[in-house]
Image: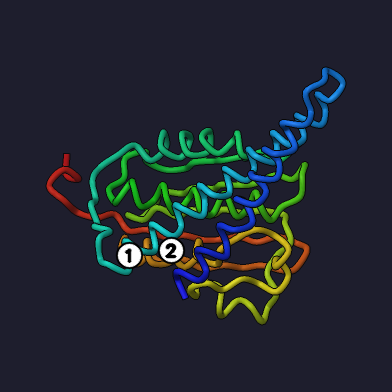
């Protein structure tokens, strides 16, 4: 199923790139600039989608093979959250904005690399499933030895009957079948969270938005004590 899903998902963006490239060769006059821009944007979006697909499939493959290792170390979580939010800003739709808040001590010890992958996945979903002009929220609270992270949006929401399947491999909600995706992202998020010895939960209402709550423990290592 993995190979079948991969070949199916790659077919659409590749077809878009090929057709847009062919049409670009036709639009050679100055007055065709708007048409060229339209197809260049299609190519850009398709390449972005291909990259997202590749990241998901490679991540799942490594997880299945046991090649994702847990490597906790001490880092400045306050600066880290800012960096991730800034990194995601170029992917926002028109008028969207990421608002983040951080409370508590800055230093935290867990796997920074896995946390980044989790946050990028959750933020990508929030952006993808929210309309233009909406706010995406990232609220972080470092307390009692835990890092509590909430990623919220005002998007399409998740049907109640889909909630129990949300973290299953290849699962996609019935209300997002018209939006590109593999159904792998949240499964990867859950498995990364488990590796980090944390928990993840979700609350959502259709057409009112979704909140993902991530709770991660402070891991005691040699470098976490100084």
- Which labelled disc corresponds to residue 157? none
The colour scheme used here is rainbow
Q: Position of residue 64 (x, y in %)?
A: 32, 69
Which residue: 34% across, 47% down? Answer: 113
Which residue: 38% across, 40% down? Answer: 77
Q: Position of residue 193 (x, y in %)?
A: 38, 62
Name which quarter of the figure residue 60 lies in. bottom left
Q: Quadrant of the C terminus?
A: top left
Which residue: 61% across, 39% down? Answer: 91
**Circle 2 residues within 10 Å: few <14, some 14–19, many ≥20:** many
**Circle 1 residues within 10 Å: few <14, some 14–19, many ≥20:** some
Name which quarter of the figure residue 75 lies in. top left
Q: Position of residue 44 (x, y in %)?
A: 63, 38
Q: Nearer the viewer, residue 108 or 191?
A: 191
Q: Nearer the viewer, residue 26 or 20?
A: 26
Report helix, strand or loop for mark 1.
helix
Can residue 96 be seen in the rendering of this structure?
no
Disc 1 vs disc 2: Cβ atoms closer than 8 Å? yes
Report helix, strand or loop for mark 2.
helix
Residue wearing tag 1: 63
Q: Is residue 181 left or right of residue 4?
A: right
Furthest toward the top, the residue is 30
Check the image and report above or below for 124 versus 194.
above
Dot placed on the residue nearer the N-terminal end, 1 or 2: 1
Mark 1 to mark 2: distance in Å? Answer: 8 Å
Check the image and report above or below for 3 versus 12.
below
Q: Position of residue 199 (x, y in %)?
A: 41, 67
Can residue 86 be seen in the rendering of this structure?
yes
Which residue: 78% across, 63% down? Answer: 207
Residue wearing tag 2: 188
Q: Nearer the viewer, residue 33 or 28?
A: 28
Furthest toward the left, the residue is 222
């Amino acid at each position: 199923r993995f190979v079948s899903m991969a070949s199916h998902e790659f077919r659409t963006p590749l077809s878009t790139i090929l057709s847009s490239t062919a049409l670009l060769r036709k639009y050679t006059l100055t007055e065709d600039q708007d048409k060229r821009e339209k197809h260049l944007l299609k190519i850009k979006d398709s390449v972005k989608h291909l990259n997202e697909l590749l990241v998901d499939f490679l991540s799942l493959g490594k997880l299945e093979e046991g090649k994702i290792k847990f490597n906790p170390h001490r880092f400045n979580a306050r600066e880290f959250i800012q960096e991730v939010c800034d990194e995601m800003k170029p992917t926002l739709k028109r008028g969207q904005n990421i608002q983040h808040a951080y409370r508590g001590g800055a230093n935290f010890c867990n796997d920074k690399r896995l946390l980044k992958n989790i946050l990028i996945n959750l933020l990508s979903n929030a952006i993808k499933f929210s309309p233009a002009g909406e706010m995406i929220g990232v609220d972080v609270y470092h307390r009692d030895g835990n890092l509590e992270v909430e990623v919220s949006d005002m998007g399409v929401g998740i049907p109640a009957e889909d909630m129990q399947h949300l973290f299953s491999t290849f699962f996609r909600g019935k209300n997002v079948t018209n939006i590109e995706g593999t159904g792998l992202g949240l499964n990867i998020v859950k498995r990364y969270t488990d590796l980090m010895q944390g928990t993840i939960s979700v609350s959502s209402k259709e057409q009112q938005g979704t909140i993902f709550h991530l709770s991660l423990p402070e891991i005691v290592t040699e470098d976490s004590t100084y």
